[in-house]
Image (tube, rainbow, N blue to C red):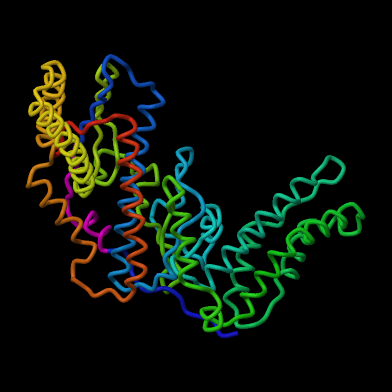
């Protein structure tokens, strides 16, 4: 089987690069709760902040993916993992933003989750299936451990490296043989124990389906693989995984077999500082009526907030038009003053909301600066080779925004102001 060279040689996507090379301002976003005389629970406040933070995180990493596509990186080398970022992990191992698959860092990649490419890739398929197989072996052996028969798991680092070399090799190896040898070597002192042999055989029976699937793709060359797996269905899988995770971990693999984690400074706790222009922070919280809290994000997020303000304006303006029409009809038939008076009060209240929303809009200066930063997604005005892949990313950007819009509306939250952070 011919060894396939992967990835594209890119050190950093252009969108992330601008944060490295320039001083990017942050914005303060002041949000006001609109419940009259009622407080928000601490869980609601936490969820509102988390929902905005998740939308912001997704917006940032999707821009990085777009930047890669405009550099014409093949979408099959861009991946999403099945795990979301966890608040309980410091992510020390990805502080430099890269993991070398040829070195001992393959195990760190495994610990992050199972990769699915934006477009189908034989290598990504094999890694995904094998990561599932190893996790299943670990679980099955662990479930059968007891005091009289202490079964040892196959060494993670050694096993992962052996199978990765198997994937890379142009020779045909048996995955089952490799794994059986790893398990037996870890339990050499039990090799003649009937209890161990029974547990071991049952474990491999349980992963037979996954091993067959691995072998199917392992025995294909890249061309046969590409003719077997549909791009459209695979793309849907990528979108589903990304959409359902709160903060999905995404990245790409370059030609040196190095994994680049996109938005790693939004993940690794080392970078949770005021100085990090991409870090989403809470600057102020006052739990009274009304609720008031202030968050800070990169200035690049300003257009998303403006979009929400404009959406709210459209809703209120449409409602105002309906009320105005009702008022005009009642005036024509000379209805009682009480009904007309009530409509006038409602229209006046809507006028006040429209005025507040208009005053909350970011300044022209902020929008221009945000557009300048966002323009780094494609600074050279490249023509994209993979329009379908870009459309998938645009879909995810819109889906993420719609979720944030829904959460803010359900929480009855209004944007009070957007200003440059001091």
Quadrant of the drawing holding the N terminus: bottom right
Q: Is 377 left or right of 54, judged from the image as shown?
A: left
Q: Nearer the viewer, residue 24 or 224?
A: 224
Indicate whether 94 appears above or below 390: above
Task: Assess whether residue 25 is covered by the magenta stretch.
Answer: yes
Quadrant of the drawing holding the C terminus: top left
Indicate whether 96 appears above or below 177: above
Percent across and percent down for residue 302 are 19, 45
Percent across and percent down for residue 293 are 26, 27
Residue occupying image coordinates x 45% and y 62%: 79
Q: Nearer the viewer, residue 219 or 279?
A: 219
Residue occupying image coordinates x 46% and y 51%: 93
Percent across and percent down for residue 261 are 40, 57
Percent across and percent down for residue 278 are 27, 46
Q: Is 347 left or right of 387, judged from the image as shown?
A: left
Task: Assess whether residue 8 is covered by the magenta stretch.
Answer: no
Q: Is 392 left or right of 174, judged from the image as shown?
A: left
Q: Which residues are magenta?
A: 14-28
Q: Residue furthest front?
A: 333
Residue occupying image coordinates x 41% and y 60%: 251
């Amino acid at each position: 089987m011919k060894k396939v060279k992967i990835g594209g040689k890119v050190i950093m996507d252009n969108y992330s690069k601008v944060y490295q090379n320039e001083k990017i301002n942050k914005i303060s976003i002041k949000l006001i709760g609109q419940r009259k005389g009622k407080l928000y629970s601490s869980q609601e406040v936490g969820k509102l902040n988390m929902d905005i933070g998740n939308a912001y995180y997704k917006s940032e990493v999707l821009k990085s993916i777009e930047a890669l596509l405009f550099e014409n990186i093949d979408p099959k080398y861009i991946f999403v993992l099945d795990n979301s970022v966890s608040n309980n992990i410091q992510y020390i191992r990805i502080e430099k933003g890269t993991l070398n698959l040829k070195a001992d860092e393959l195990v760190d990649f495994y610990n992050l989750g199972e990769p699915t490419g934006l477009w189908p890739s034989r290598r990504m398929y094999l890694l995904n299936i094998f990561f599932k197989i190893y996790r299943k072996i670990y679980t099955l052996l662990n479930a059968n451990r007891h005091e009289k028969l202490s079964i040892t798991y196959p060494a993670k680092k050694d096993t992962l490296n052996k199978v990765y070399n198997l994937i890379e090799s142009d020779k045909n190896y048996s995955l089952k043989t490799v794994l059986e040898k790893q398990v037996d070597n870890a339990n050499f002192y039990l090799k003649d124990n009937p209890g161990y042999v029974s547990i071991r055989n049952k474990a491999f029976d349980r992963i037979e389906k996954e091993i067959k699937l691995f072998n199917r793709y392992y025995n294909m060359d890249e061309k046969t693989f590409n003719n077997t797996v549909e791009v459209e269905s695979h793309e849907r899988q990528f979108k589903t995984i990304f959409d359902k995770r709160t903060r999905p971990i995404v990245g790409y693999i370059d030609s040196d077999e190095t994994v680049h984690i996109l938005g790693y400074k939004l993940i690794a706790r080392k970078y949770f500082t005021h100085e990090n222009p991409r870090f989403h922070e809470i600057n102020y919280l006052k739990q009274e009526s009304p609720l008031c809290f202030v968050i800070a994000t990169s200035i690049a997020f300003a257009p998303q907030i403006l979009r929400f303000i404009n959406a709210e304006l459209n809703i209120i303006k449409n409602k105002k038009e309906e009320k105005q029409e009702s008022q005009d009809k009642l005036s024509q038939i000379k209805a009682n003053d009480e009904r007309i008076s009530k409509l006038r009060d409602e229209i006046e209240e809507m006028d006040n909301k429209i005025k507040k929303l208009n005053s909350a809009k970011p300044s022209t200066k902020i929008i221009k600066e945000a557009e300048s930063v966002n323009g780094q997604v494609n600074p050279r005005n490249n023509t994209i080779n993979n329009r379908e892949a870009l459309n998938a990313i645009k879909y995810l950007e819109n889906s993420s925004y719609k979720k944030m819009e829904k959460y803010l509306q359900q929480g009855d939250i209004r944007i009070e102001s957007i200003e440059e952070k001091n």
